[in-house]
Amino acid sequence: MNGSGCGVGPQAEYVRRHHKHEMAENQCSSILIKHIKSPLHLVWSLVRRFDQPQKYKPFISRCVVHGNLEIGSLREVDVKSGLPATTSTERLELLDDDEHILSMRIIGGDHRLKNYSSIISLHPEIIDGRPGTMVIESFVVDVAEGNTKDETCYFVKALINCNLKSLSDVSERLAVQGRTESIDRI
């Protein structure tokens, strides 16, 4: 798995401990890191909502979860127009409220992300003397037919970067508004 600034320090340890993917020859993978000027509990309250990814993921228009929100839960996601996709069926693989880790796998839908799985972990840090959050997201996905590994990886990284930018914007806006409670209560 190729990294994005994960060489040394706590980032490297977090990646080693939490971001393990089995990768086949026809797949690509990467790691992205975002530093958010908002406390971990506030960022986590957005990320952990497997049933409401549209709270911060700008390309999702609707999400329906089948059954209780637990490991193995499935969600049907509608994707906004403008992307080469319309729907996605996704399974919750891991939701760890103690370690702040969420993992999901795409298992169906109308899109080009075959055998996609991702892990997102959140870690407290101090940014400009205030509580902040380091978000690490890693993924593995099949190389899309007709594309190279680099092209597929570039596309997925662009999507994740948009999601992480939106997560940062939403959680920092909530923090500035003085919202210190979890988004679940809002």
Image (cartoon, rainbow, N blue to C red):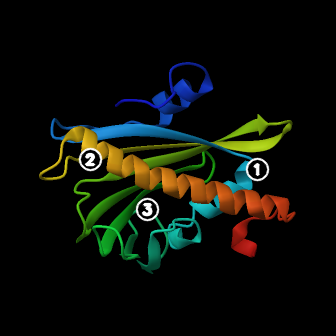
Secondary structure category for the residue under label 3: loop
Element at label 1:
loop
Q: For residue 152, which numbered disc appears in the image? A: 2
Q: Relative to the observer, which residue lies in front, 92 or 83?
A: 83
Of labels 2 and 1, earlier in sequence is: 1
Q: Residue furthest front?
A: 82
Locate residue 150: give its quadrant: top left
Residue 95 visible from this viewpoint? no
Q: Position of residue 181 (x, y in %)?
A: 80, 64
The residue wearing badge 1 is 39
* Residue mark closest to the camera, 2 vs 1: 2
Looking at the figure, which quarter contains the N terminus? Answer: top left
Question: Please, what is the three-letter code of the amino acid marked with disc 3?
Answer: Ile
At 37% from the left and 29% from the top, the residue drawn is 2
Q: Position of residue 8 (x, y in %)?
A: 55, 18
The single residue placed furthest to the left in the displayed view is 146
Mark nearer the viewer, 1 or 3 = 1
